[in-house]
Amino acid sequence: MTAPADYHDRLNTDLLARLPAGARYVLEIGCGSGVLARAYRAGHPAADYTGVECDAAAARRAQAACTRVVLGDIEAAACWQALDQLRPGPGWDLVVLGDVLEHLRDPLATLAGLAARASVEARCVACIPNVGHVSLVYQLLQARWDYADDGLLDRTHLRFFTQPTMVALFAQAGWEVQACTARVFEPEATERALLPLLELAPRLGMDTEAMRLHLSAYQWLVEARRR
């Protein structure tokens, strides 16, 4: 399947805003054409920024934004071998995964492998789609699960997460989640869609505000530190 034309060129400004300042060694998995790397290094030009990208055309463009780019699949042994040759002495102190984990066959193994190669005080920042979003709940209520070229049900997604399962995944892999922030798109339309479901919360013994939060999150921004 071919990705949308701008897929590798999208800048996630919410993800960028959560990257800690002053990281010396940065490793971004799925760096696309380097838009996040370029934006981060504009404010932190001293950052040594390594990108990993499996799309050859995007990887070529990312070379201008990153210190270096590894062309390959993060789940392939050859990619890990390349990273081990490039790894700085103390390990990477910032690992970035923007909309990556849902595409992996074994995200737990990947997160664990990254933790093992990170510095003692390393941070990991990720953006992950929320399978509990209200739009998908309505699909299930209509006995539907419609894959698409993009979005929450992108055809290339192999794994699906809610906020609690994301936190558990990171914990199993050796990361301690410190913050998990909802990205809410089209908040007014989302709130209108939520109202009929929120009315059910008391009957289901659920907290209304917790239900609102989990149904409204289109994606979760996860900030973790190495344990």
Image (cartoon, rainbow, N blue to C red):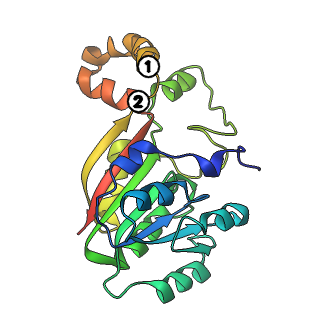
**Residue 134: x and y, percent?**
46, 25
Where 137 falls versus 176 (above or below)?
Answer: above
Question: Which comes before the other along the chain, label 2 or label 1?
Answer: 2
Residue 119 visible at all: yes
Mark 2 in CB contact with mark 1 (< 8 angstroms): yes
Mark 2: give few (<14), some (14-19) or many (20+) Cα within 10 Å: some
Q: Is residue 56 left or right of residue 36?
A: right
Q: Nearer the viewer, residue 41 or 84?
A: 41
| Residue 90 position in % (x across, y down) | 30, 84
The residue tagged 1 is: 190
x then y, percent, for residue 142: 59, 19
- At horizontal 30% and vertical 54% (from top left) the residue drawn is 223
On screen, residue 15 above or below 136: below
Image: 102 above or below 197: below
What number of labels is visible? Answer: 2
- Residue 206 appears anywhere in the view: no
Q: Nearer the viewer, residue 177 or 86?
A: 86
Q: Position of residue 129 (x, y in %)?
A: 48, 42
Q: Residue at x 58, y 78 (%)?
A: 79
Q: Residue at x 35, y 43 (%)?
A: 163
Q: For mark 2, what is the residue? A: 184
In this rendered view, identify the residue nearer to me: 127 or 171: 127
Q: Looking at the rendering, in which quadrant would you find the C terminus?
A: bottom left
Residue in the foreground of this view, choosing between 211 and 222: 222
Q: Amino acid at mark 2?
A: Val
Classed neighbour count for the residue bearing mark 1: other residues with Cα under 10 Å, few (<14), some (14–19), many (≥20): some
Q: Callout 2: helix, strand or loop?
A: loop
Judged from the image, the secondary structure of the residue bearing numbered disc 1 is: helix
How far apart in space, not on screen, are marks 2 and 1 (Cα)? 8 Å
Return the mark for residue 215: none
**Given the image, on which type of amino acid does mark 1 rest?**
Thr
